[in-house]
């Protein structure tokens, strides 16, 4: 799969973007982070290989043009749980809109018991949704139909 551009919603330390960079060195990478301190650390200490956008990802998904990213990754957490708005159809539809046909959506879900609820919402948007378990986390994958 060719990845021309990827965005990580909920940047944190940027590890997911580092992994994209390894496999796709020419891809344009973006991270969206609401917390200014985390965004600063991502730029300076963690040296995330991406443009860092300080914004609320829940609102930001409606900003870029449709089809802007080959890959949309979601890793949105507050101190202890998935940000509640990240499980809503309005946000997930915004992520869908950012993908071109054939684009890939990935979402890290913790705690894993939230995965069923989010998967049901994703199935309203995508024809196929897959899940993979990684310890206490579940990652949901979906591809926008060509």
Image (cartoon, helix red, strand yellow):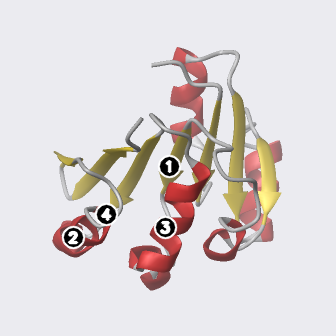
Q: Quadrant of residue 117?
A: bottom left
SS type, badge 2? helix
Q: Is residue 19 above or below residue 116?
A: above
SS type, badge 1? strand
Q: Residues within 10 Å of mark 1 (few under 14, many from 20)?
A: many
Q: How far is disc 4 from disc 3 in space, using C-alphas?
A: 8 Å
* Residue at 76% in and 56% down: 64
The x, y position of residue 122, in whole percent, is: 31, 63
Q: What residue is pinned by disc 1?
A: 73
Looking at the image, the residue that sits furthest to the bottom is 84
Q: Is residue 21 visible?
A: yes
Q: Residues within 10 Å of mark 2 (few under 14, many from 20)?
A: few
Which quarter of the image is occupied by the C terminus? Answer: top left
Q: How far is disc 3 from disc 2 in space, using C-alphas?
A: 13 Å
Q: Which of the two residues, 45 or 140, is positioned nearer the viewer here?
A: 140
Disc number for residue 122: 4
Closer to the chain start, of discs 4 and 3, is 3
Q: Is residue 136 above or below residue 116?
A: above
Q: What residue is pinned by disc 3?
A: 93
Q: Which of the two residues, 92 or 131, is positioned nearer the viewer here?
A: 92
* Residue at 69% in and 68% down: 62
Q: Residues within 10 Å of mark 3 (few under 14, many from 20)?
A: some
SS type, badge 3? helix
Q: What residue is pinned by disc 2?
A: 120
Q: Is residue 80 visible?
A: no
Q: Quadrant of residue 1?
A: top left
Q: How far is disc 1 from disc 3 in space, using C-alphas?
A: 13 Å
């Amino acid at each position: 799969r060719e990845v021309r551009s990827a965005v990580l919603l909920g940047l944190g330390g940027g590890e997911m973007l580092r992994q994209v960079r390894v496999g796709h060195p020419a891809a344009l990478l973006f991270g969206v982070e609401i917390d200014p301190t985390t965004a600063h650390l991502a730029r300076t200490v963690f040296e995330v290989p991406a443009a860092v956008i300080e914004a609320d990802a829940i609102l930001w998904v409606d900003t870029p043009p449709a089809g802007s990213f080959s890959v949309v990754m979601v890793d949105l957490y507050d101190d202890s749980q998935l940000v509640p708005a990240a499980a809503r159809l309005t946000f997930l539809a915004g992520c869908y809109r950012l993908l071109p046909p054939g684009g890939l959506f990935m979402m890290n879900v913790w705690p894993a018991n939230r995965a069923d609820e989010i998967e049901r919402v994703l199935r309203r948007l995508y024809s196929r949704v897959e899940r993979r378990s990684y310890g206490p986390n579940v990652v949901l994958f979906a591809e926008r139909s060509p």
